[in-house]
Image (cartoon, rainbow, N blue to C red):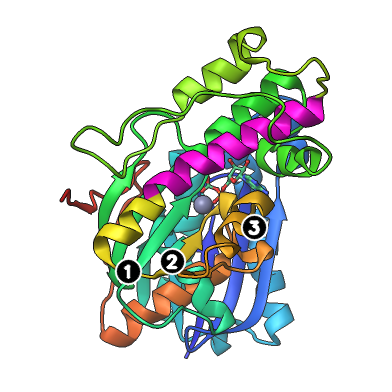
Amino acid sequence: MKVLGIESSCDECAAAVVQDGKTLLSNVVATQIPFHAVYDGVVPEIASRKHTEWIYAVVKEALDTAGLGPGGIDGVAVTARPGLLGSLLVGLSFAKAFAWARDLPFIAVDHMLAHLYACQLTGDSGTGYPFLGLLVSGGHSIICRVDNFDDITVLGATIDDAVGEAFDKVSKYYGFGYPGGAAIDKLAQRGSPDAFRFPMPNLYKGEHPYDVSYSGLKTAVINQLEQFRVKKTTGPEDIAASFQKTAVEILLRSLFRAAEDTKLSVVVAGGGVAANSYLRARLAERRDLRCVFPPPELCGDNGAMIAGLGYQYLIRGDRSPLRVTASARVKDFKRSYP
Ligand code: KG4
Ligand code: ZN
């Protein structure tokens, strides 16, 4: 079954064709980065307009690359949440029109679940369900138990900023570049992670042991730089490396605690921040955990993960009605505390 996947939740206009939920026939990602970079952040109105201008060409290229016409598609999957509402509506409306015109099975999916599915497009999904999911993006930081492609239980989440958002904000403040995550990751390669000691939040003693928080770190890095300085030699590389180290350690502290308590030893990561090289290196050190990452090009937003996840719903017989709407926020995932 060849599924067309469309993703337009933020600043990537993306479409892909995936066969049987795992074989990529095409994966087109048209990034709007240059249009937002001048503002050091995504401008929602520009994002929606660009999606409207580009969506036809992006879908056409995905079909052409797969060597298919519209008649070669067996189902349509699209992101319906979470994301920027105006951007989501462009992809969603295009996908509905495509499905209606061709009378195709149609499914609207949650793009956070799709990020978790991205690993399966490389044929490596860990050792099957259940596993621990680490969903880290510009909008979310979620540690969860994953029992199926559509069944996750949130164990911990950010209580304020998302980890990717912290990367983006710090980068914006220091002028490291946009988007911030990749810019800081690159800069940090040349810096010392121990040049600055930034604060770690103290959440673990409370009743939410797997939650994370980034607003304190972000504020410390941005506003109170001087008081955390432990060395005299400072450059942007050192700030980037020290911030990155702390940001990742905050995540790992909760993740490792969750792994210990749940006895789950497979971790599957997804989302833009899963591309982070320090995060990957730190997780690779843990011999007792098996950590599965999507290839860097499938960490960020893409249509392939939407098509892959959509296939799983479609073969189960699930369909979305064509009246389905977009929503800016993530659907309420089940939440559980020990
Ligand atoms: O999943 P994604 O493409 O979009 C959202 O759903 O948010 O994630 C984008 C986020 C941005 O905050 C970006 O700065 C971050 O992922 N990111 C990174 C890296 N590459 C992208 N963060 C840290 N290190 C990276 N290498
Ligand atoms: Zn995303």
Residue at x 45%, y 78% (from the top left corner): 126
Residue at x 33%, y 73% (from the top left corner): 149
Residue at x 25%, y 63% (from the top left corner): 262
Tell whether label 1 touches label 2 (CB within 8 Å).
yes
Q: Dot 1: what SS?
A: loop
Q: CA distance from mark 1 to mark 3?
A: 20 Å
Front-most of residues 164 and 200:
200
User: Where residue 264 is drawn, which disc sits there?
Assistant: 1
Residue labelled with disc 3: 281
Residue labelled with disc 2: 267
Q: Dot 3: what SS?
A: helix
Amino acid type at circle 3 is Ala
Magenta stretch contains residue 260: no
Could you tell me what secondary structure mostly forms the magenta stretch? helix
Q: CA distance from mark 3 to mark 2?
A: 14 Å
Residue 110 lies, in percent from the top left, at 37, 58
Residue 51 lies, in percent from the top left, at 61, 48
Q: Which residues are magenta?
A: 236-254
**In front: label 3 or label 2:** 3
Query: Is disc 2 surrounded by few (<14), some (14 to 19) or many (20+) residues within 10 Å?
Result: many
